[in-house]
Image (spheres, grey):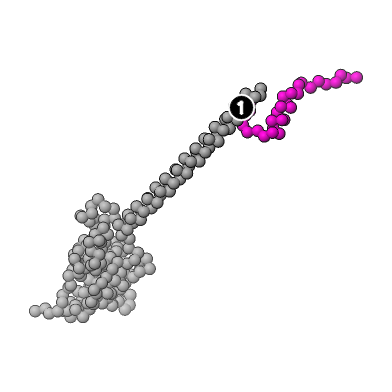
Amino acid sequence: MIMGIQRPAWLEALYTQKFFVGCSYHETAKKNEKNICCLDCCASICPHCIPSHRFHRLLQVRRYVYHEVVRLDDLQKLIDCSSVQAYTINSAKVVFIKKRPQNRQFKGAGNYCTSCDRSLQEPYIHCSLGCKVDFVLKHYKDLSPYLRRCNKLTLSPDFLIPQEIGEEETQSTIVDSEERMSWSSGSSGSENNMRVGCNQNQMIVRKKRSSSNYKVVGNFDNEDMATSMISRRKGIPHRSPLC
């Protein structure tokens, strides 16, 4: 008879649930990929499902080299991850969830995974969380000494929730529409002023046309008008006779 805890329900969910597939509850929504594991419901969810699980423990699942990984800082709150080799992604250390077996015919010097025979750096002896869990259950038959009590687990601050993005876009749209309305009202007022000014200029030109015998083109000042009048009064110049 095997005594002790074999695998907690949340750990089984990490192994068996499918991640990075479309959410059936939000098929038409954007960014509906399942990349979160709800540890209380033992199910994979997408970012749109977060409001229904906002009081649950949530663990973000990432991808690295076509394999599922989780942040080391988050996983250490749930289980002892010592002797498991971690890798760095975007300045954050991550741990592989499942085994990554490979066929090796020869072993050289150095450390190798206890389950996958994968070459590791010292002092690590497990290449994934699954390899360590299998090793502990095989040799000690009990996983409880390695489990840690975690009553609260939230997503990292850099995780984007589509609902919040949608609210920001709506607010920006409202602000833009208000700015357009204020600009259009201001521009309409300026256009009306321009029309009034044009009408006044047309009235001035018409008066000048009625009181004089020449055309007024554009806006002339007094000097330009005097010059034009003098040039029009002058006749054809005549040269003095040669002596």
Quick check: 41 left or right of 208?
A: left
Q: Nearer the viewer, residue 32 or 50?
A: 50
Q: Is residue 58 magenta?
A: no
Give the amino acid type for the residue marked by disc 1 in the picture: Lys
For label 1, the SS is helix
Name the quadrant of the C terminus: top right
For the magenta stretch, what is the residue range? 215-243
Quick check: 184 left or right of 97?
A: right
Q: Nearer the viewer, residue 141 or 173?
A: 173
The structure residue drawn at horizontal position 24% and vertical position 59%, both measured from the top left corner, is: 49
Residue 86: which quarter of the image? bottom left
Residue that badge 1 annotates: 207
Q: Is residue 175 above or below residue 11?
A: above
The structure residue drawn at horizontal position 76% and vertical position 21%, both measured from the top left corner, is: 235
Name the quadrant of the N terminus: bottom left
The structure residue drawn at horizontal position 57% and vertical position 30%, both measured from the top left corner, is: 202
- Residue 189 screen position, x and y as percent: 48, 41
Q: Is residue 4 above or below residue 178?
A: below
- Residue 182 screen position, x and y as percent: 44, 46
- Residue 201 screen position, x and y as percent: 58, 32
The structure residue drawn at horizontal position 74% and vertical position 23%, both measured from the top left corner, is: 233
